[in-house]
Amino acid sequence: MADDFTIDVQGLTKRYGERTVVDGLNMQVRRGEIYGFLGPNGSGKTTSIRMMCGLLTPDAGEGHTLGLDVVREATQIKKRVGYMTQRFGLYEDLSIRENLEFVARVYGLDRRGERVDASLQRLGLTARAQQLAGRLSGGWKQRLALAACMLHEPELLLLDEPTAGVDPGARRDFWNEIHALAATGITVLVSTHYMDEAERCHRLGYIAYGKLLVHGTPQELVERSGLASRSLEGERAAELAPELEHRDGVSTVTRLGDTLRVSGPDAAALDAAVRPLAERAGVAVHETAPSLEEVFIFHSRSAADNMQ
């Protein structure tokens, strides 16, 4: 494995009975990088993450995480990885400090008091250290969960939809902290459904039906998508949505107030579908760059058609 890759896996495959959940995953994540892992529910994101951090043994494939073999050295990998799940898993009847002290004892960490104090300070939890975890808001529970992940000073953070159900302000604060951690050299692999969070990542991978379909920087994914996009603006724009959704050349239709965003893989076919309707309704049409959401929806639907 190249020295600059924290994760470098080839052909990772996981099956449950006759169902292939992850199918030949090839993936590389650089050191100090925030890599966004996207895909619909059931796409194989969580299973892939668990194989890469040693929690699941792949049925086929090979690779390394933190320079360690994902099959033969899974136990060593787990000691150097912080894994934060979507669901809050700490004790609600213990205080923030008591939760962190408990985690430190379970893992047999040295310098427990020092580690707990440092984690409290890093996540802005010191003033709330005696507060019961069950009385925290979603955002503060999220901070506590991340503080617990950081106690053993991991080199890789695996975050499985960590901001689900958290308000926008708390999500912003969380991402500021993630970028601060990455700046210290910690690698972060995060799965998310939020497009604004995807844009905060250095690179992205999109998985559907167990296959990694595309990967690259957010800008590269938009530029390589081949999609054309149009913005329809006017009081009657929203009225056109039902008809546009069924027209040849149109892949996605998104309502944004009185504005419609319409995209498709062929610019000429898209214009042929859109412009006659827009002229009839007196709606202005503007060319615009496709959004990440449009790119990922297009790839997801293409993958679904291939599976059929």
Image (cartoon, rainbow, N blue to C red):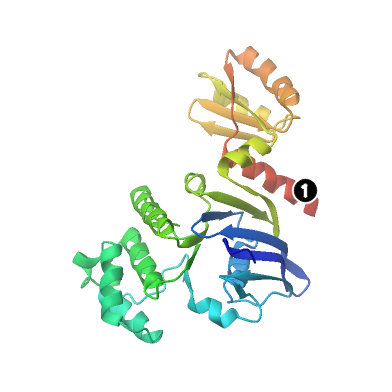
Residue 248: which quarter of the image?
top right
* Above/below status of 1 relative to 78: above
Amino acid on which the number 1 mark rests in the picture:
Asp
**Residue 46 pos. (x, y %):** 58, 65
* Above/below status of 149 relative to 308: below
- State the SS at label 1: helix
Query: Between 178 and 153, which is closer to the camera in this rendering?
Result: 153
Residue on which the image places disc 1: 305
Residue 288: which quarter of the image?
top right
Query: Between 203 and 191, which is closer to the camera in this rendering?
Result: 203
**Residue 37 pos. (x, y %):** 57, 56
Please indicate, yes or no, whether residue 94 appears anywhere in the rendered image: no
Side of 92 relative to 127 (left or right): right
Side of 202 relative to 168 (left or right): right
Side of 61 relative to 170 (left or right): right
Side of 239 relative to 180 (left or right): right
Residue at left 36%, top 74%? 151
**Residue 214 pos. (x, y %):** 67, 49
Residue at left 41%, top 55%? 183
